[in-house]
Structure formats: structure tokens, C-alpha cells
Amino acid sequence: MSSLAPFGVRLRRVMDERGPLCVGIDPHASLLTEWGLNDDVAGLERFSRTVVEAVADRVAVLKPQSAFFERFGSRGVAVLEKSVEEARAAGALVVMDAKRGDIGSTMAAYAESFLRPDSPLFSDALTVSPYLGYGSLSPAVALARESGAGLFVLALTSNPEGGEVQHAIRADGRNVGATMLGHLAAENTGEEPLGSFGAVVGATLGDLSSYDLDINGPLLAPGIGAQGATPADLPKVFGSVVRNVVPNVSRGVLRHGPDVSALRAAAERFAEETRAAVALV
């Protein structure tokens, strides 16, 4: 067993202390160029280290997008390992955005990469895809429970293509997205103050009152900033469960780099706007 408290407990604590904001670390080529950096490992390292230095000691969550590191091979993964270590040392929780999903021993291996405490890439939580069937996530669920980590399961995503799967109607009359929310509510039954198994639900989706978002777990909400949603939209989208929302901002903060002070100011502005919006509910 891990010495860590469950992810939901740690997330609730840091959200209450720092506000609920999650800042993405998405070093794609265009952002590296905007920062005046080369699209190489040195540029990747400078970018990631600067973001961690700027905000890891003041936001609740940092969410590195694994693909932007993996594209540089083993040296890029080494930068990711260091970024995770430094972010967690500064007090931020790390959600690894890797969207892994497979079956059996392969899913178990993905889980061990990110959720085993002695792994160089150990993260506080991992995004996962349930679209080989929710049961395919069982190895990740089990290891997350054992290690004190969490999962964020793709349920109602902000990309337009997601609807063809997530809005599909099952034989029982529920759509697939609602089914995933139901599975997560079952995982979190009886957990206090917050379960460790969350859903990814886009902040750009508008009225979601037809869905039961009260899963007793966190709701990772991409779409704030460059995708068009604002912190003020959160109560309209999430209603009474808005306090459990972890709104994700990536480009809205990252475009202010490489100046550390400007990155901090942008993150603090989004954090304050989010606190104000949540306080209205």
C-alpha cells in the first residue's frame, strides 16, 4: 500500500488551498516557436521548466500532455520525468494527460508506467479512455486505489467528434457518456470528501442538466481559454457540482511565456476568476 492519501483527498485539499485551476503543459511546435525556442529537446526542456517554475507552487494541478514529450523519443520522456518530479515537489498535483486505454496486461502495463509509486513517471492521476469497455480499465482502477492515485475517464469530451461515440444510445436507453458517469459514481461510493475517480467533461458543452454529474468525484473540464469557454461559464455547465470541477487552461496561460511573471499573472487571473465563479453557486 502507498503512504499517499487517496487522490480525491489530496485534490480536495489543494483545491481548497490554491483554488481549482489546472494548467496544461502542452509544448507543441507552434508554442515553442512563439516563445522563441527551437522545436527540439532543448526547447522542450526550457519550455517545460519555465512553466513549472512559474506556476507549480501556486496552482492546484499541472497537466502535461505526454504526446508532446514522447515525440522527441527517450530524451523527451526524460524531460517529462523531470517536469513531473519538479511539479510535485513544488506542491502541485500532476495529472498525466496520456489518454491510455487497452485491455488486460497491456492496460496493466500502461497503469504501471504512470501509477506505480516507484515509476519515474508516477503521477497523481492519469487520463484514460474507456472505449474498449469500462471494464478494460480495471487494472488501472486497481493500481490507482493501491497507490493513492486517481483516474480521469473520458466521458463527455469537448471535441465535436466525440459525440458519435459518447452520445450513442445503448440498449438500456442511456447514452454511452452517461454510462461512464454511472460507473464512476459507483467507484466513488462512500468516499469522503471526494472520490479519486473523475470524469473528463468539456467546459464548452453548454447545458448538461440532462446528465447526472454528481459522481462524488472530480470533473476535469478542458476548454477554458483558447477553446472559448470562460470561468464564468462553469456554473451554467456544471450546476450544483461546480465545486468539484477542475477547469483546465492551457494556451490561455502558456501564450504569455516565456516571461515567468507574465505566466504567473495569467494563471493567477484565471484562478481568481474561477474562484469567483464557483463562489456564486
Image: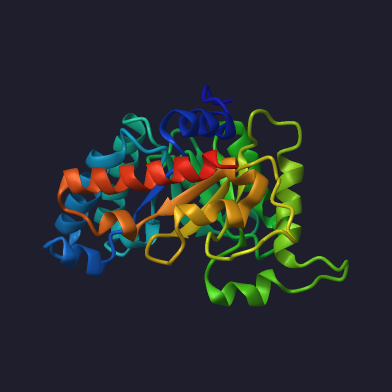
Residue at 29%, 43% (x, y): give it: 83
Residue 173 in percent (x, y) is at: 86, 68
Q: Position of residue 160 (x, y in %)?
A: 55, 75
**Is residue 261 visible to us here?**
yes
Quadrant position of the N terminus in the picture: top right
Q: Of residues 80 and 212, which is closer to you in this image? A: 212
Residue 254 image offset from top left, x and y in percent: 27, 56
Quadrant position of residue 33? bottom left
User: In the displayed structure, would residue 30 be above or below residue 19?
Assistant: below
Q: Which residue occupies 30% across, 54% down?
A: 253
Tell me which corner region of the image, top left, top right, bottom left or bottom right, holds residue 185: top right
Left or right relative to 48: residue 62: right
* Residue 112 appears in the rendering: no
Nearer-the-camera pick, 265 or 177: 265
| Quadrant of image for the C terminus | top right
The residue at 71%/54% (across/down) is 181
Query: Horizontal and vertical percent for residue 177?
Result: 70, 63
**Above or below, 194 relative to 68:** above
Whether residue 262 sits left or right of residue 149 in the image: it is left
Going by the picture, which residue comes out furthest to the top?
3
- Count of numbered marks: 0
